[in-house]
Amino acid sequence: MSSTATYTVVGMTCGHCVRAVTEEVTGIPGVTDVQVDLASGAVTVTSDGPVDPSAVKAAVDEAGYELASS
Ligand SMILES: [Cu+2]
């Protein structure tokens, strides 16, 4: 079953940032699609099941950015 979650990433400024975040988050097991909106920092993650938010946080950290604290 596919599920979708949206996160907010802080610190992205250009298309390169978007690509870096997209690549890292796409690498999380089960993730099938990642859509990033640069203007708002919204990152929509589609997956084949629930994805651990800490895995998303780790991937975003790895790309060099931060998740906004909710
Ligand atoms: Cu950039």
Image (cartoon, rainbow, N blue to C red):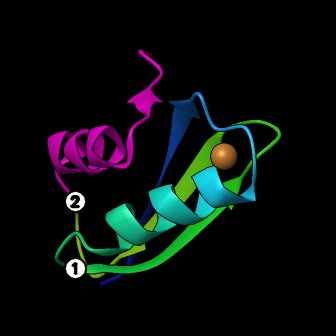
Residue placed furthest toward the right: 39
Quick check: 35 above or below 48? Answer: above
Q: Is mark 1 within 8 Å of ligand 1?
A: no
- Mark 2 falls on what kind of element? loop
In the drawing, does residue 29 fall left or right of residue 16?
left
Q: Position of residue 52 (x, y in %)?
A: 16, 50
**Residue at x 73% of width, y 58% of height:** 15
Instruction: Please state which of residues 1 and 52 is positioned toward the viewer in this rendering.
Output: 52
**Hey, what amino acid is under mark 2?**
Val
Sequence-first disc among 2 and 1: 1
What residue sits right under mark 2 in the picture? 51
Left or right? Give the position of 65 relative to 51. right
Q: Residues within 10 Å of mark 1 (few under 14, many from 20)?
A: some
Q: Position of residue 41 (x, y in %)?
A: 67, 38
Give the quarter of the figure containing the N terminus.
bottom left
The stretch of residues the image draws in magenta is: 51-69
Name the kind of residue labelled 1 in the image. Gly
Q: Quadrant of the C terminus?
A: top left
Distance (Cα) linking label 2 and label 1: 7 Å
Q: Does residue 13 appear left or right of residue 56 in this picture?
A: right
Verify whether residue 8 appears in magenta.
Answer: no
Is 55 magenta? The answer is yes
> Residue 12's x, y, as percent?
64, 38
Give the residue at mark 1.
30
The secondary element bearing badge 1 is classed as loop
Tell me which residue sits at (22%, 59%) in the image. Answer: 51
> Against 41, is 70 above or below?
above
Say above or below: 4 vs 67: below
Q: Are the residues tagged 2 and 1 within 8 Å (C-beta)?
A: yes
Question: Could you say which is closer to the camera, residue 43 or residue 27?
Answer: 27
